């Protein structure tokens, strides 16, 4: 009988089945044979080194940005909203009448907070949601720069921008400037990636549409240099449809409102210029730049700005250093052989978006230049990172320095060797840049703490004035008139109006007709009756009430509306411009 040759696979299967049915001694024998195999010993003795995971620097910076807002800003500003915030929130809050919306504003930020205001009127909830959203937007905006600059340089750019005090304060505020800045830096990054990334054009169109919805004029200043670049550079011409379609889609609402309220785009721009005090070079060349420097560390709005002086000038050195750093970034990038567009395009866009605020206005606010700061961050970060790399390369090319002999001791392990390499990689340029950056961040944190407290004081005045008006009997539906009417009216749940100034939205005659049917109050600034500005002519016979904890504001309450008295009939004749004093005095203010 001929013996058949068993294939190796079948032999292994037979041995496996026999081993399965054998005793524990056989199992131990097979395990020992497996360990003694040469390939198994090689696998045990020479394991494949694991590649260390990259540190998510950009995500860590975004997380730190959110923590700074929760720990430094929100404890001061979580109770009340500021002036402009009240205007924007009132447009989407279903519980209060919408405040007057002037021509320079855009409604994108109102749409952004609409989901939160529809759920709850809580200011802490609104600010917390914006803090988280702004941190996520910071990560997304600079994430698009990673293929252009590298992970660490893009994270450094995000740190430079997020470390500014005005960036930390604006993250949880209902203001459009920060969101325009993040959209602008994201748009420029996607624009530069159009030749290499197939989906970059869609992201470019989307970010520009968001910018136009948030603030249409600023989006126009950012898009203009991109259009010129796309026309001149053939590789970037595929971005032209996105550059035209994105702003057109986002600005459609602004254009429609311009025709509905102001007679067209030219009419809205004309009214916007008048609201801003007349935009143009007639204020003096660089008037806005001087105002921006005086308000660099506060106040939050410098209008008029003649009587303000820059406090703590040492904290303004970073602002004065920005133009030289931006000017040095371009030739350094050319000398090192980097793509010219990656440095030149954000610099030109930053200069373009800063033009109206530095040259065409005579007042300023620190938040106005946020888009320019965001666009300057990538070139400045690339300049700093390049200086560190150059210093490291020169140090590597220099003759090696022989380390002193170890005294009776050999290398203790990979951990000590890695630490030695990291310490040796620190160059003088890296140490200097790191020290300067640390001092800059500490100074900005100090300014952030002070300005957050100042913003809280101003917003608390509006809240206290609204609380006192409610105690005086001003309940919805009601009307608040005067220079502080918009924030106080929103806090009180009333409509707001003004008979003069930039927010003029009602005539005195129409105001008196409304005062005859709903509770109405006129606000003025003064330390008491007869010590401050006189009330308007139509309110001189109204009863004055001081508003405690507001810095001397007064509220002139109209006579009790006829609709509230059941025994009186509604008047059909028009109310005279100067009503008679009421028969019964209004209850005094509660201190």
Image: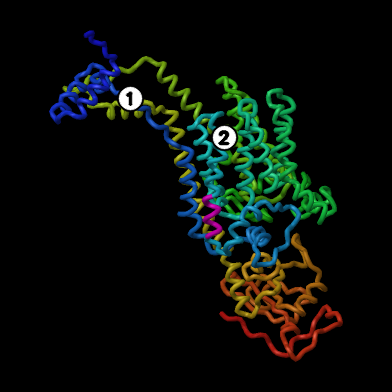
Q: CA distance from mark 1 to mark 2?
A: 31 Å
Residue marked by disc 2: 144
Residue 530: x and y in percent read: 69, 77
How packed is label 1: few (under 14 Cα within 10 Å), some, or many (20 or more)? few
Left or right of 67: which side holds 122?
right
User: Which of the 4 image quarters holds residue 22?
Assistant: top left
Residue 127 covered by magenta stretch? yes
Left or right of 234: which side holds 135?
left
User: Which of the 4 image quarters holds residue 281?
Assistant: top right
> Which residue sits furthest right?
573
Instruction: Give the label on residue 49, or none.
Output: 1
Q: Report whether residue 122 is seen.
A: yes
The part of the chain drawn in magenta is: 125-132
Give the answer, above or below, for where 194 lies relative to 300.
above
Name the dominant secondary structure of the magenta segment: helix
Secondary element at image label 2: loop
Q: Nearer the viewer, residue 195 or 541?
A: 195
Q: Quadrant of the N terminus?
A: top left
Q: Nearer the viewer, residue 494 or 332?
A: 494
Residue 205: x and y in percent read: 68, 38
Residue 333 covered by magenta stretch? no
Residue drawn 71% across and 72% down?
479
């Amino acid at each position: 009988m001929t013996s058949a040759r068993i294939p190796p696979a079948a032999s292994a299967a037979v041995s496996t089945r026999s081993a399965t049915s054998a005793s524990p001694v056989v199992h131990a024998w097979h395990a020992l044979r497996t360990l003694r195999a040469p390939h198994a010993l090689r696998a045990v003795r020479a394991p494949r080194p694991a590649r260390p995971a990259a540190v998510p620097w950009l995500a860590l910076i975004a997380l730190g940005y959110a923590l700074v807002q929760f720990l430094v800003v929100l404890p001061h500003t979580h109770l009340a909203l500021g002036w402009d915030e009240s205007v924007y929130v009132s447009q989407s809050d279903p519980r209060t009448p919408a405040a007057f919306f002037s021509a320079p504003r855009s409604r994108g930020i109102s749409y952004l907070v609409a989901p939160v205001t529809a759920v709850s009127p809580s200011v802490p909830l609104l600010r917390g949601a914006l803090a988280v959203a702004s941190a996520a937007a910071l990560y997304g905006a600079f994430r698009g720069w990673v293929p252009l600059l590298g992970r660490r340089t893009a994270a450094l750019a995000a740190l430079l921008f997020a470390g500014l005090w005005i960036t930390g304060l604006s993250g949880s505020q209902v203001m459009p400037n920060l969101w325009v800045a993040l959209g602008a830096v994201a748009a420029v990054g996607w624009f530069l990636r159009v030749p290499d990334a197939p989906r970059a054009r869609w992201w470019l169109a989307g970010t520009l549409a968001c910018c136009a919805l948030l603030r249409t004029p600023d989006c126009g200043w950012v898009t203009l240099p991109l259009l010129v670049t796309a026309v001149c550079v053939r590789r970037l011409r595929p971005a032209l449809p996105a550059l035209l379609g994105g702003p057109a889609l986002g600005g459609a609402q602004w254009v429609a409102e311009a025709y509905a309220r102001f007679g067209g785009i030219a009419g809205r721009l004309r009214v916007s210029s008048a609201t801003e005090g007349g935009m143009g070079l007639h204020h003096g060349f660089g008037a806005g730049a001087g105002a921006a420097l005086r308000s660099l560390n506060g106040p939050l709005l410098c209008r008029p700005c003649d009587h303000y002086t820059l406090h703590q000038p040492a904290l303004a050195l970073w602002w004065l250093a920005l133009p030289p750093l931006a000017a040095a970034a371009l030739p350094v990038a050319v000398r090192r052989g980097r793509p010219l567009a990656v440095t030149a395009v954000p610099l030109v866009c930053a200069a373009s978006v800063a033009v109206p605020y530095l040259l065409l206005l005579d007042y300023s606010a620190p938040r106005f230049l946020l888009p320019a700061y965001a666009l300057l961050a990538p070139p400045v970060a690339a300049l700093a990172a390049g200086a560190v790399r150059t210093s490291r390369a020169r140090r590597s090319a220099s003759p090696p320095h022989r380390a002193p002999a170890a005294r009776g001791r050999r290398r203790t392990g990979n951990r000590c060797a890695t630490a030695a390499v990291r310490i040796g990689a620190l160059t003088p340029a890296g140490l200097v840049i790191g020290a300067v950056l640390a001092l800059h961040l500490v100074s900005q944190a100090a300014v952030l703490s002070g300005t957050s407290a100042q913003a809280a004081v101003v917003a608390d005045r509006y809240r206290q004035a609204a609380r006192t008006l409610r105690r005086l009997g001003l309940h919805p539906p009601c009307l608040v008139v005067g220079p502080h009417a918009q924030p106080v009216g929103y806090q009180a749940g009333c409509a707001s109006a003004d008979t003069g100034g930039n927010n003029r939205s009602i005539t005195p005659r129409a105001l008196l007709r409304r005062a005859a049917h709903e509770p109405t109050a006129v606000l003025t600034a003064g330390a008491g009756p007869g010590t401050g500005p006189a009330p308007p002519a139509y309110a001189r016979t109204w009863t004055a009430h001081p508003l405690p904890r507001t810095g001397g504001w007064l509220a002139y309450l109209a006579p009790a509306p006829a609709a509230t008295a059941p025994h009186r009939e509604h008047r059909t004749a028009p109310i005279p411009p100067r009503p008679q004093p009421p028969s019964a005095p209004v209850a005094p203010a509660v201190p």
